[in-house]
Amino acid sequence: MSMFHARASLLAAALAVGGAAMMTTPASATGRDRGHAGLRRALDRVVADGGGPGVVAEFRDARSAPWFGTAGVADMTTGRERRPGEHFRIGSLTKAFTGTVVLQLAAEGKLTLDDTVAKWLPGVVEEHLGADGTGITVRRLLNHTSGLPDAIPGQETPRPEEPGKRFIYSKVNYSLAGMIVELATGTTLAEEIEHRLARPLHLTGTYLPGTEETAVRAPHARHYSKPGEGGPDAEIHDVTEMDVSWAGAAGGMISTTSDLHRFLNALLCGRLLPPAQQEEMFTTVSTEGSGWVPDTGYGLGVYSQRLPCGVTLWGGGGFIQGSMSYAMGDRQGTRVLVSNLNGDWNDFQETFTTLFETSFGPAVPPPGGAGG
């Protein structure tokens, strides 16, 4: 089977799929801990409120040493605590890597953002989605204005809309973008991410696993899931080993907190893209009315998010079975927070908004005096 037909089959599979007592330990921290008492308390609350088995957060500020904190456990059976260097599935944070590769190819003249899906993938969206690929550009794939619907597990795929009309967050867009990367380069997306991003940035824990690689490389936290709408008493399943190749370019990658820091800092600082492509990546479309993350604007693989405190951050989040992650920083990349929760039943937005408001919002003294 050719690489083109193999990826087309994965796209079809993605459309078909759609996508013990809790043990807790107090938050622990490594590195200089000055000024992070509020973040430590926020991590403790996530676990104490039943939000997941364990959570990690790594905060980096150009003016001080990195700070790393944890709460809860990496393994619900043994009670092992979470620790630095763990690998975890990053879900839709993969889109930032895919978008960066596409923009690098555009800078090299191997494709343009105005190329159509019909040019690169003739007949694919027509056959699988009933859409017209002549009106869908690479840019519209990356900023989710293609009109293509998302693939929701267990639900019938909606009809496509007119391209360019509005923002519709869809994994299908990035599945197609990944296929275009492979046709433009003659190699796999995993190989392009490795030699363009992981190797130059020394991201030793970052990779896109293949279809045969169902485990998460050690060290790692166990990944836990409550399938469906189970509620607080739903059975918890260990989903650490699973095939997520269907998520691929849209959400299949694995990384670490430190690697995500290096990647996002390099991206925000403009070290990965020439000025023209950097401007393209950070030019956003409104997500208002889409039912997606509130107060956001979506670029080409990254998005901006205005916190309730008024601060605007840049980066992305990722939700996949058994793992929830966020990596956001200021526009200059001088302050970045990366966090991961090894469970998928928490209120994704509420949890991470609290962590980011605590890290980037105005300092609020704790009850009884100043914190440390």
Image (cartoon, grey):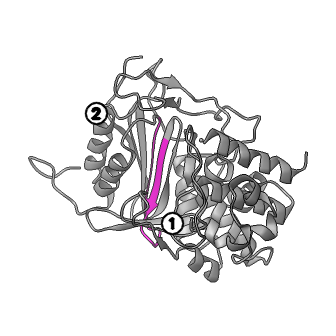
Judging depth in this view, the residue of 105 and 227 nearest the camera is 227
Q: Residues within 10 Å of mark 1 (few under 14, many from 20)?
A: many
| Label pair 1/2, CB-CB below 8 angstroms | no
Residue 317, percent from left and from top: 48, 53
Q: Taking 321 as reference, is 55 left or right?
A: left
Callout 1: SS:
loop
Does the rendering let one see residue 370?
A: yes
Judging depth in this view, the residue of 339 and 202 nearest the camera is 339
Q: Is residue 182 magenta?
A: no
Q: Give the residue pinned by disc 1.
A: 167
Q: Residue at x 63, y 39 (%)?
A: 17
Give residue 73's quadrant in the image. Answer: top left
Q: Taking 343 as reference, is 148 left or right?
A: right
Residue 112, percent from left and from top: 73, 77
Q: Amino acid at mark 2?
A: Asp
Q: Residue at x 52, y 77 (%)?
A: 283
Q: Which portion, as a residue range, is magenta?
A: 324-342
Q: Amino acid at mark 1?
A: Phe
Mark number, residue 367: none
- Residue 141, compared with residue 243, is above or below; it is below
Q: Give the residue pinned by disc 2.
A: 49
Judging depth in this view, the residue of 162 and 97 nearest the camera is 162
Does the rendering let one see residue 32?
A: no
